[in-house]
């Protein structure tokens, strides 16, 4: 196969969120905070919470089902499934295998990747790279899904205000027409900053014990101030890099869909890239930070709200624990 003869396009997009909303006002009953404090510092007004009865694989499968419907495809047409998540339903087996079963897919490869909030974009690049060189993979389902409420410390007002549950999915298809779809991805990581966003216990390095549970070490911890600085720098550099690699400029972009972590980070990215906020798609006020689900969820809503047309150039950019970052340029098909 000659990769230059093909495009990897987003044939279908879908998303799913739990019905339960947790508003800022309701959070004041759990921790010392206020709607005004949360809104001015994060841009978040509410987030969705799955609860104990709704499993991650159910949310992910629903997003995948909607993406398939949007693509006009049947489950048996999918050749591989990748699920990006930092909150897997179980450590073993992978959430992707559980989603495969729920969707009734064939016995195709199915696996998880954990790159936190950058995960879906990493999955996008993995799928694209494989599809361009291996004829076996013509249609690939890439899902970003999180049930972060299970890893949120509801006693910590610095983090519990931020996170929500959701899933977003895209059906990628290889077509015999170059110049469309995912034009490229720019990925990076810096393990020296791993401690800025982490879950201290629960892995093989620090297995669960009564002491780790009592110390609340199985919940997400974050150094917000340091993350802010690193995130803005990493995302702006990744965005500029992927635009340059594709001979594009900010003026060519119809829409920018950033990871929805904090409205102040998005505003700082807007200033750094010298792109007005009206070209950024923002839905953080409704969902909070949904990690790997953030960008595909935004993409699903933006394609309708912004009425994407064939040939429109879209920038996707994220950062996450690791620390990791990713950016991609997509020419809508």
Image (cartoon, rainbow, N blue to C red):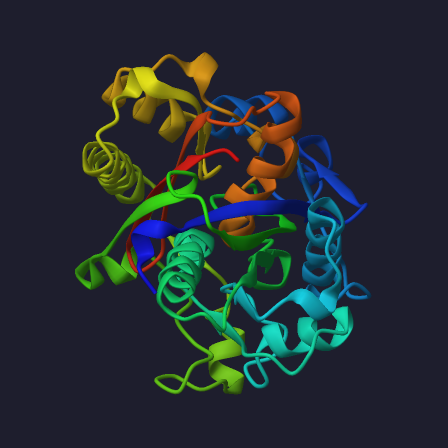
Above or below: residue 305 compared with residue 157: above
Q: Quadrant of the N terminus?
A: bottom left
- Location of residue 178 with respect to 212 vertically, above or below: above
| Residue at the image position 21 percent from the left and 63 percent from the top | 191
Vertical placement of 45 versus 12: above or below?
above
Name the residue nearer the viewer: 133 or 12. Answer: 133
* Residue 324 percent across, percent down from the top left: 30, 54
Q: Position of residue 294 (x, y in %)?
A: 53, 44
- Residue 202 in sight from this viewpoint: yes
User: Would you identify the image quadrant in which residue 273 lies?
Assistant: top left
Q: Percent position (x, y) of residue 168?
A: 61, 49
Q: What is the count of numbered marks?
A: 0
Name the quadrant containing residue 230: top left
Specify the quadrant of the image occupied by residue 251.
top left
Towards the viewer: 311 or 161: 311
Q: Residue at x 24, y 40 (%)?
A: 238
Q: Is 304 left, or right, of 113 in this rendering?
A: right
Residue 157 visible in rendering: no
Q: For this rendering, which residue is in front, 317 or 234?
A: 317
Is 288 on the left or on the right of 122, as rendered? right
Residue 328 location (% of width, % of height): 36, 42
Q: At x 82% / y 66%, what residue is drawn?
A: 53
**Left or right placement of residue 217 versus residue 50 in this view:** left
Q: Residue at x 38, y 84 (%)?
A: 206
């Amino acid at each position: 196969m000659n990769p230059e003869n093909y495009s990897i396009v987003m044939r279908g997009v879908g998303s799913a969120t739990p019905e339960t909303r947790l508003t800022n006002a309701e959070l004041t009953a759990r921790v010392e905070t206020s709607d005004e404090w949360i809104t001015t510092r994060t841009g978040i007004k509410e987030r969705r919470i799955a609860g104990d009865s709704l499993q991650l694989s159910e949310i992910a499968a629903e997003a995948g089902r909607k993406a398939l419907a949007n693509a006009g495809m049947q489950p048996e047409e999918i050749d591989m499934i990748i699920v990006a998540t930092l909150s897997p339903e179980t450590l073993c087996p992978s959430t992707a295998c559980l989603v495969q079963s729920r969707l009734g897919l064939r016995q195709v490869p199915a696996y998880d990747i954990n790159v936190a909030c950058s995960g879906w974009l990493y999955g996008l690049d993995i799928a694209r790279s494989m599809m361009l060189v291996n004829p076996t993979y013509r249609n690939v389902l890439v899902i970003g899904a999180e049930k972060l409420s299970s890893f949120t410390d509801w006693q910590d007002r610095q983090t519990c205000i931020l996170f929500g549950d959701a899933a977003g999915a895209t059906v990628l298809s290889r077509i015999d027409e170059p110049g469309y779809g995912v034009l490229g991805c720019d990925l990076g990581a810096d393990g020296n900053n791993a401690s800025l966003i982490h879950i201290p216990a629960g892995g093989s390095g620090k297995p669960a014990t009564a002491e780790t549970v009592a110390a609340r070490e199985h919940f997400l911890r974050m150094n917000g101030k340091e993350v802010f600085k690193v995130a803005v720098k990493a995302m702006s550099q990744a965005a500029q890099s992927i635009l340059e690699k594709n001979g594009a400029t900010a003026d060519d972009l119809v829409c920018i869909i950033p990871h929805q972590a904090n409205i102040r980070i998005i505003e700082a990215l807007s200033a750094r890239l010298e792109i007005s906020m009206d070209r950024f798609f923002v839905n953080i006020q409704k969902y909070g930070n949904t990690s790997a689900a953030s960008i595909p969820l935004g993409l699903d809503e933006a394609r309708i709200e912004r009425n994407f047309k064939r040939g429109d150039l879209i920038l996707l950019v994220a950062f996450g624990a690791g620390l990791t970052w990713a950016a991609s340029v997509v020419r809508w098909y």
